[in-house]
Image: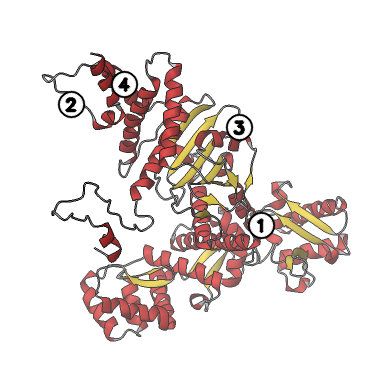
């Protein structure tokens, strides 16, 4: 027992002079570490679940619902998940809640950047789960086809910087879950925006790296230019990751890794490289079971030998994860781990060289691979003979002239309201970005290239055509607002900001909420009102308490089911079972207890039974 847990001498029971104890016994206490009462968090979550499920069952505005808890792989908003169809609401709603019982009057803020990043990561994880045809009813349909809300629900206070909302959905949520203050939307700073925009880019680059790795390893070479992320980043990849050949007679190009790619140290390119290498090594690992001990022995004797280290990496004995090497088997001698840590921190050149050897060996004959002619935007992509190309260029030129004539000033907006044929990559303006259309760092808009001699064949022809029709072509600037247009750099874009703003628009704080006892009282009140409407109770308050105990018991049993949970819906019978199993409670004040009769009564029901009623009956007898 620690010193803090030892009872002080002033608290020890004292004996009187006769050796007997004083009649008044002192209570022994000790100081507890904050957060040790874990059961309160569980009760908080299960009682809040009980409140939401009860209201969902009996609220006429809710036409259909699915309720879940502890959903896997969605991050921190997994405590309570609700999908519902509401009357007079166009879209279904999805509510994802993190329920936290906080002690010591802590504040809930966005000041902790790690917490904010985790919160945003959870939003991204959930967003990825939504897709058409999903078998999981919680995530059916596209993300933008549902009204999603991400809720931090806590007993903690806020810092007063949030803003209230009178939105119909928020009003509904306040009625559904609030046991304290109404929900509010937290404010955010430019620093928050910068942090999360970087996170958007990192997440996109990791996903992109995984897609490119899959494509490189795919013998069939799937239609890579149909992927939205590839459409956004293929120009950057052609500038920073791959060397791209001219178009071959067969109609495709050849991509090969740049010589310095595997030694890349620029922050975002390194994120891409690390994710790409991890994916390749995972997909192309080899079996070296018979050589494991020999390879480890060689590594320990020569830890700076990149060739030996690469064999351990290829054999999946050492894995490359989050930019570091680590033993796959966690139960290895401490001395082995120390050697590897030394390489991670003090000999990064050996680490990078070993990974490069392992990846290149894994790729073997796929270090060069086919890509579509449009990959990298080396030239404007128009298929066909010269007549067909000229005809298409005339069409694109007329569209640009039309836009200029409709524009006041010299800034032309190109957005997603324009026809798809004009915007697309094949035969559209998207393939001109990076060759004919370049970025102007001075005004952060796009402009037409001034030196046509650097352009390839089709782009050069289009430039001459435009100059013949628009002599002052170089004066115009283009404001590109099309999501899948190629990015020319890894700088932050308006679309990165839109993702972050969408996250903040869907994030809500429910602070200063009641604790688990307050939530319990709220449920009992709701049960009492509901059961009283049934007009069949002689003691609604007494029964509502008993029903709650059985109802919460059913919720907890459902909550504790491991691995695979069953959605609670309007057809679920948790509440009905609780009502049916407590019908005996109504009879208890009238039961005459006899020494010859033994009742085996559930302990939870006994808690709701008031023994004073029995005493009054006995006195009246």
Label of residue 90 in the image: 3
- Pinpoint residue 296: horizontal percent, then vertical percent: 26, 78
State whether residue 239 is above or below residue 224.
Answer: below
Local SS, label 4: helix
**317 or 335, nearer to the observer:** 335
The residue singled out by tag 2 in the image is: 600
- Colour pattern: secondary structure
Of tags 4 and 1, the one toward the viewer is: 4
Q: Quadrant of the C terminus?
A: top left
| Outermost front residue | 17
The residue singled out by tag 1 in the image is: 485
- Callout 4 environment at 10 Å: few (<14), some (14 to 19), or many (20+)? few
Q: CA distance from mark 4 to mark 1?
A: 61 Å
- Callout 1 environment at 10 Å: few (<14), some (14 to 19), or many (20+)? many
Of tags 1 and 2, the one toward the viewer is: 2
Q: Is residue 126 visible?
A: yes
Q: Quadrant of the N terminus?
A: bottom left
**407 or 128, nearer to the observer:** 128
Local SS, label 1: loop
- Pinpoint residue 21: horizontal percent, then vertical percent: 18, 51
Q: Is residue 269 left or right of residue 601?
A: right
Pointer 2 or 4: first along the chain: 4
């Amino acid at each position: 027992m620690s010193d803090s847990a030892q009872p002080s001498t002033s608290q020890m029971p004292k004996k009187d002079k006769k050796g007997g104890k004083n009649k008044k016994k002192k209570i022994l206490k000790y100081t507890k570490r904050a957060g040790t009462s874990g059961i309160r968090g569980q009760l908080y979550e299960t009682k809040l679940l009980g409140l939401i499920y009860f209201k969902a069952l009996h609220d006429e505005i809710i036409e259909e619902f699915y309720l879940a808890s502890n959903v896997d792989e969605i991050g921190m908003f997994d405590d309570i998940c609700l999908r519902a169809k509401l009357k007079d609401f166009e879209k279904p709603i999805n509510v994802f809640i993190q329920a936290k019982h906080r002690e010591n009057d802590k504040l809930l803020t966005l000041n902790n950047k790690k917490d904010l990043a985790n919160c945003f990561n959870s939003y991204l994880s959930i967003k990825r789960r939504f897709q058409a045809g999903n078998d999981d009813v919680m995530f059916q349909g596209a993300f933008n086809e549902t009204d999603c809300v991400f809720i931090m629900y806590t007993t903690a206070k806020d810092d007063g910087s949030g803003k209230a909302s009178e939105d119909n959905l928020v009003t509904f949520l306040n009625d559904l879950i609030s046991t304290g203050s109404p929900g509010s939307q937290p404010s955010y700073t430019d620093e928050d925006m910068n942090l999360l925009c970087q996170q958007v880019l990192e997440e996109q680059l990791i996903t992109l790296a995984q897609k490119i790795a899959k494509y490189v390893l795919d013998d069939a070479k799937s239609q890579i230019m149909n992927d939205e992320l590839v459409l956004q980043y293929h120009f950057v990849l052609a500038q920073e990751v791959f060397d791209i050949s001219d178009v071959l007679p067969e109609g495709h190009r050849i991509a090969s890794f740049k010589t310095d790619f595997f030694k890349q140290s620029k922050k975002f390119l390194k994120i891409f490289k690390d994710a790409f290498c991890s994916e390749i090594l995972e997909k192309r690992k080899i079996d070296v079971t018979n050589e494991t001990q020999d390879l480890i022995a060689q590594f320990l004797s020569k830890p700076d030998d990149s060739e030996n280290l690469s064999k351990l990496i290829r054999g999946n004995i050492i894995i490359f994860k989050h930019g570091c090497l680590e033993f796959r088997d966690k139960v290895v001698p401490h001395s082995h781990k120390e050697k590897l840590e030394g390489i991670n921190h003090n000999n990064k050149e050996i680490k990078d060289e070993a990974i490069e050897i392992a990846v290149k060996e894994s790729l073997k004959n796929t270090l060069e691979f086919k890509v579509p002619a449009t990959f990298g935007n080396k030239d404007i992509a128009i298929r066909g003979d010269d007549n067909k190309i000229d005809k298409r260029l005339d069409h694109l030129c007329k569209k640009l002239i039309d836009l200029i004539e409709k524009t006041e000033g010299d800034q032309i907006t190109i957005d997603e309201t324009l026809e798809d044929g004009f915007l697309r990559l094949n035969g559209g303006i998207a393939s001109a970005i990076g060759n004919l259309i370049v970025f102007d760092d001075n005004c952060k808009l796009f402009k037409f290239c001034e030196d046509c001699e650097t352009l390839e064949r089709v782009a050069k022809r289009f430039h001459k055509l435009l100059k013949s029709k628009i002599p002052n072509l170089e004066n115009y600037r283009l404001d590109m607002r099309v999501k899948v247009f190629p990015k020319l750099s890894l700088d932050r874009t308006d679309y990165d900001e839109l993702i972050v703003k969408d996250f903040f628009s869907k994030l809500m704080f429910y602070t200063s909420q009641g604790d688990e006892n307050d939530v319990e009282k709220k449920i009992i009140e709701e049960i009492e009102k509901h059961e009283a409407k049934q007009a069949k109770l002689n003691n609604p308050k007494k029964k509502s308490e008993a029903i709650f105990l059985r109802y919460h018991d059913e919720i907890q049993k459902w909550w504790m089911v491991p691995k695979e949970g069953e959605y609670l819906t309007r057809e679920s019978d948790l509440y009905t079972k609780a009502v049916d199993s407590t019908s005996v409670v109504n009879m208890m004040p009238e039961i005459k207890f006899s020494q010859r009769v033994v009742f085996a009564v559930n302990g939870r029901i006994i808690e709701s039974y008031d023994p004073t009623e029995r005493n009054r009956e006995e006195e009246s007898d």
